[in-house]
Amino acid sequence: METHLMEEGFRWFGPGDPVPLSFIRQAGASSVFTSLHQIPYGEAWSREAIRERKQMVEDAGLRWTAVESVPVHEDIKTGRGDLKTLFENYNNSLRNLAAEGIFAVIYNFMPVLDWVRTDMRWVLPDGSESLHYDPVRFAAFEIHALKRPGAEADYSPEQLEQAAAWWASLDDDARDAFVRTIIDVFPGVKWALSLDDIRAMLAKYDGMGADGLRRNLARFLQAVIPVAEEVGVRMAIHPDDPPFSVLGLPRIVSQASDVEAIFQMVDSPANGLCFCTGSFSARADNDLPEMVRKFAPRIHATHLRSTQRLADGSFYEANHLEGSVDMPAVVRNLLDEQDRRRADGRADWQIPLRPDHGHTMMDDLPKPAGITPGYSCIGRMRGLSELRGLMLGLRAAGRL
Amino acid sequence: METHLMEEGFRWFGPGDPVPLSFIRQAGASSVFTSLHQIPYGEAWSREAIRERKQMVEDAGLRWTAVESVPVHEDIKTGRGDLKTLFENYNNSLRNLAAEGIFAVIYNFMPVLDWVRTDMRWVLPDGSESLHYDPVRFAAFEIHALKRPGAEADYSPEQLEQAAAWWASLDDDARDAFVRTIIDVFPGVKWALSLDDIRAMLAKYDGMGADGLRRNLARFLQAVIPVAEEVGVRMAIHPDDPPFSVLGLPRIVSQASDVEAIFQMVDSPANGLCFCTGSFSARADNDLPEMVRKFAPRIHATHLRSTQRLADGSFYEANHLEGSVDMPAVVRNLLDEQDRRRADGRADWQIPLRPDHGHTMMDDLPKPAGITPGYSCIGRMRGLSELRGLMLGLRAAGRL
């Protein structure tokens, strides 16, 4: 039986990832999403470094289908510094990736931090661990630990009261551990950041606002999309996680109107989206199946996971087929887009997917630290397997 | 969204199983298929023993939906011994199970051995391990190790030649290890069987033939089905694995006509089938979706897995959504049967499923012996997750 499903991938953090490539193959993935994490942000990726990583992946019987990510240097987001060199380096990375046959490039344009949660080990009823975001706890971080001026304005009086009470209930060790939970996922951080470091990072965005950040994104796209087009690279911007402002920072990839604005900055198929259901779904007013339908031609990669939104504004990462995401409708719309691309004779018709954040479960639970939160092997394998079955079921229903 | 899927289960071998109930919950199962393995074959199960096991399962947040199995004593299969007591004990077990609210009972009527493979650690390209059956190797066992009279007649001259060559290539240690591979899965064997033990077990079936075994099965059904009917128990016979004669033994649950004959022995809804796709699929002339359609009202439990048949008559256990089984069509037909049962207002509309034999993979690979071949946790979890997604996809397609 001929089925045309999406290409199944798995994120791999490179040779230092505690999840080996052999496990990724056993999870049923045929490809990986990986990045050259060893290269500092802002430097160009050489063909040699790309080829070496590609060879490593292929030696394990897998393909490197999507780069996640070619990071955007903070100076590009703030619009300061030697932008010419940074753009040139970025374009050289794109050229070298294309020369090695890698054409999907994910990036994000979130200031300071890629994503944030308030608990990385939130225990579910089945004993597995999930990621959790609680605005009350985040308020406690901002107001009582970071002491960000004006942070109070982002919360309701009730949230502020709860945050103060929760913070007061923690002893010093618990406060330190909580602060580290939030800080340790700041991207590209190889050293222990202090709260003062964070304040300095935030200060660079003082007064910029969403429009300022959009101008900086537009400048970046104007610099790199022509090169991407020329060499056949499909750029895929990742949405904000969570999809609303945090730490008073501008966030400009949180909802459909944001995506539309970005697509219009440089109106090219190479200027596309990484459709992350987990990120978009943390906001109730995002209609995910409709967003897939609308943006389909420019969706160049997908992260599939679900969140469960709760009444108090918190959310946790649900099993991939449960929670707030209508995953069958999302996947059906993605498969429909693939059909259209195939019908158009496009060689790049297949949209790479990877399961996102899995629960930490079974043998991954007692493993020593080293697994990136959300990137346990077994929980992601469960998610990928569920998605595989879902795709097959949606496709097979047509012939049965 | 309301979906009515099959109830997801996982086999659990009881408190001695190296796979804990907590892992089974994390795999997404809501129920287990288990048996009181500590009770010798032929003895009645007390309500206390049943209740104790049930409590253990429920304490872990799971339900005990299917008994796998209430074993049929060898004397019942051979038609010798104190059958009256054996039937009485069996019926008492059924009464006690029903009194504790457990209504699906799986059993098999395979003489001497439940299932057989020739390699329990067959390595797949992804490094995971699968079960494999090779008729040439089985011929080597029968002819050169067991020296069963007349075994040669069951094989082609080419197979006999290959078997002899393969056997000759093994040293004594390799021969011993191979013989143990086959013998160690003989059911209910808590001690090391010798080849002479096997010969004695086989001798009890000398001259019985399929018709003789069918008469013994009919006698058993006539003794237990009335009681099952009375207390609401649904009996589910398991097909032969593999679905053809081995060791010269009669096998009477290998194909559709066998099932029809069994249903006619006692024409009652309580006289049903455990539909095992893995078992039936090892035979090319079994049309599985059609068999499900035909036998649906009497399918009381399901084992879902796939095999990949190869041209030389061998087969291995494929991933659950790959191989020779049209799993989407099988599952669609099972879901259709559930719909009919619900429409009829039946309380027991939901058909319990469990993934069968998973590959040994990831963290299960280096685990010390103790995992029953095919019953690794992670591989079965992959299978169950794929089936969950498949069911959801088939169901969701109707509303999308």
Image (cartoon, coloured by chain):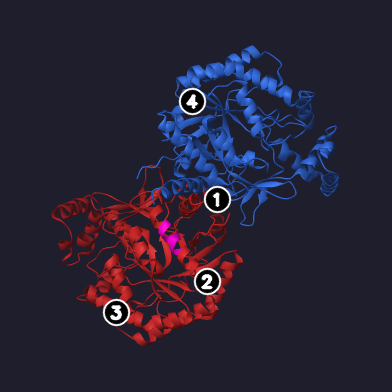
Chain colours: A blue, B red
In the rendered structure, which amino acid carries the disc numbered 1? Asp
- The alpha-carbon separation of the residues under discs 3 and 1 comes to 46 Å
Eyeballing the image, is B21 above or below B400?
A: below
Disc 2 to disc 4: CB gap under 8 Å: no
Q: Which residue is tagged 2?
A: B347
Q: CA distance from mark 2 to mark 1?
A: 37 Å
Per the image, is A375 magenta? Answer: no
What's the CA distance linking mark 4 and mark 1? 35 Å
The residue pinned by badge 1 equals: A363
Q: Nearer the viewer, residue A236 or A167?
A: A236
Give SS at disc 4. Answer: loop
Q: Magenta part of the protein: which range? A: B332-338
Q: Quadrant of residue B41?
A: bottom left
Number of other residues with Cα within 10 Å of mark 2, as a class: few under 14, some 14 to 19, many 20 or more: few
Kindly identify which residue carries mark 4.
Answer: A103
Q: Position of residue B70 (x, y in %)?
A: 42, 74
What kind of residue is marked 2?
Answer: Ala
Classed neighbour count for the residue bearing mark 3: other residues with Cα under 10 Å, few (<14), some (14–19), many (≥20): many
Residue A197: quarter of image: top right
- Labels 3 and 2: the sequence-earlier one: 3
The residue carrying pointer 1 sits among few (fewer than 14), some (14 to 19) or many (20 or more) residues within 10 Å by Cα, namely some
- Rendering coords of residue A157 (x, y %): 86, 44
Chain under disc 1: A
Q: Report, in whole angstroms, how far the alpha carbon at label 3 lies from the one at label 2.
A: 33 Å
In the image, what residue type sits under mark 3?
Asn
Q: Is residue B254 left or right of residue B22?
A: left
- Tell me the CA gap for discs 2 and 4: 54 Å
